[in-house]
Image (cartoon, coloured by chain):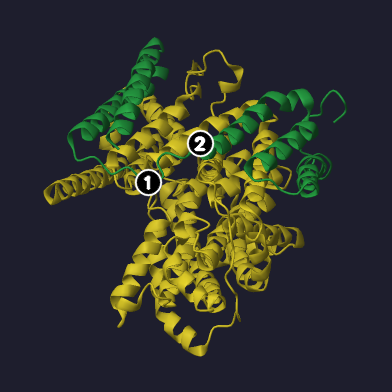
Chain colours: A yellow, B green
Amino acid sequence: MVESFQLLMGGFVTALQPVNLLFALMGCVLGTLIGVLPGVGPAAGTAILIPITVVLDPTAAIIMLAAIYYGAMYGGTITSVLINTPGEAASVITCLDGYQMAKQGRAGPALAIAAIGSFIGGTVATLGLVLIALPLTRFALRFGPPEFFALMVVGLSLVTGLAGKSLVRALISAILGLLIAQIGIDPVMGAPRFTFGKMELLDGFGIVPVVMGLFGIGEILLNAEARTQQVFDTRVSSLIPTTQDLKTSAGPIARGTALGFFLGLIPGIGAIVPTFLAYSVEKRVSKTPEKFGTGMIEGVAGPETANNAYANAALIPLFTLGIPSSPTTAILMGAFMMNGLIPGPALFKEHGEFAWAVIASLYIGNLILVILNLPFIPLWVQVLKIPYSILMTLVLGFSVVGVYSLNSSAFDIGVMLVFGFVGYLFKKLDIPTAPLVLTMVLGPLMERGLRQSLEMSRGDFSILFTRPISAALLAIAVIVILTSTLRAISAVRGADSQV
Amino acid sequence: MRRPYQIVGGCLLLLATFVAVEALALKYYTKLGPGPGFFSFWLALLLGGLALTMIIQASVGTPEPRPADFFADRIGYLRMGAVVLALVGTTALLDVLGFRLTMFAVYVFLLCALGRQRLLLTLGIALAGSVGVYHVFDRWLRVPLPTGPFGF
């Protein structure tokens, strides 16, 4: 543990350099702006801003992108409270009591408690990252291709946790992601697959155009179709919470931190689950559960804390095992790779200074957010007054620049448009998009793991089941899949019996 | 929602068949283990199975109610068409006309199509989004953006 803290102190030395501090600040501000803009979630927002970081030193680039990520988590709260429209999915539940508080003229305390809770949740989760990172990476360094393959299978099996109403639809989304990942040069033999003679497809589809299409353009198409016109008419009073507000929120913040942190460790849970669970826990422990939904500050404090604790804890599987937990962490993983860094156990060994600097920056970013966000609220209110048609046009313009500038390729804009359609259809048909993104990132790693394992064993599949860690991980994957399947079957039976 | 899921399931089944056939054209297995077509083939089979399940669920089970906003009105689709047209135009013209001209035209078109703004505001946003963004990316961030035949 002492070693971890020593390394963290070294990380602080790097992260506190003026240039890194500046990029953390910029990331927090941009992230909050992304969270504030309805229709631009953290995944698309982080993807749009990747090109800006291409010219930066890798440490500054990842510090900025990580700040955008958790900044967006906080920004989503602002619109939930002020206009009853979540800026990103994890803030949906905050609308229930946050907006009611705003209608009572208590938007300020709601946002302040959300900021304080987010800070505490995020900071504690980062402390967890510091404590867990080294032991977990040391363990993971014993992994060979079979263990790595099994780990990826666990990651994919957890995708079933992202299933909404239908497991079948979630699995279809996951398989489509794996198939998309098949396009391009085969990772082992170098043969082109599904490229149809097009040079642009030799590298496969980039994660950025796909994510921006699914989450950004898809949302723009839906809003264009629905003729969304943003009207902001909520009054923002004093931002300072009362002593009673602080007392009432202490318990929800503590519970939200614990819940968000532990759920963040499990890849594939998604940011919505911790917030909904935190809300239901608060409702359950409350002496006045019937008042939830009428402007209870606990209904804001618990979910918002859980949200940020989750966002920071979700970086633990990414940093230590190389498993992204959400579309946004998948984007972060892509950004790592663009900078020549492979997340996973080797990251701490080969680029320790970088890894600890980014972890240290998480503390700094959380502090920046709590200090900056409250005074910035009047600015975000002004942003929300911009007509939606202008916002939509600007987001579309930035998406074009973001996608084009990565490879200087207009083809990528076409890819973004195609996946925009896919995102639109997925939303209409209630097919979750997150499994597609996660499997698209994990797919090539899994395939390489399996094929390298079989090369080691000369084609003998038993290598996957005879090595203890690999066998244990595969058993976990089987249990997860069986549990999800049984849950889905019982849900269908329940629905049928009600008819 | 019975019919949409049946149609999507059918399309996915076709896609799965296509992928399976293409995958078999690649090497399925080599001396060293699975070949380039191995994964794709099994994924296509899984997709086919899931597509069939989707069709069966939609045909046999109780259909999910169709959301009220599943279909948009004519203006909604026209606005959506404007976004698509803007992106198709950008893809086709960006390398030909250059970033500044193309994006200027796209911004003006979209701002008019999605919700008319004052002319000065429209031109201001279009200039900032095209010339301004070009300046920031190309000059400050050193991220090259295309220049057209007229030096724009």
Quadrant housing residue A306:
bottom left
Q: Total number of numbered labels?
A: 2
Is B118 located above or below residue A359 in the figure? above
- For numbered disc 2, what is the local secondary structure? helix
Q: Which residue does the numbered mark 2 point to in the structure image?
A: B74
Is B93 on the left-hand or right-hand side of A420? Answer: right
Is A317 on the left-hand or right-hand side of B44? Answer: right
- Judging from the image, mark 1 belongs to the subunit labelled B
Question: From this viewpoint, is residue A206 visible?
Answer: no
Judge depth for marks 1 and 2 and give the one in front: 2
Question: From this viewpoint, is residue A365 visible?
Answer: yes
Q: Residue at x 35, y 29 (%)?
A: B8
Quadrant housing residue B114:
top right
Q: Residue A287's x, y, as percent?
A: 30, 83
Q: Residue at x 70, y 57 (%)?
A: A23
Label 2 near label 1: C-beta < 8 Å? no
Q: Residues within 10 Å of mark 2 (few under 14, many from 20)?
A: few
Q: Which residue does the numbered mark 1 point to in the structure image?
A: B68
Q: Residues within 10 Å of mark 1 (few under 14, many from 20)?
A: few
- Which one is nearer the viewer's eye here, A216 or A191? A216
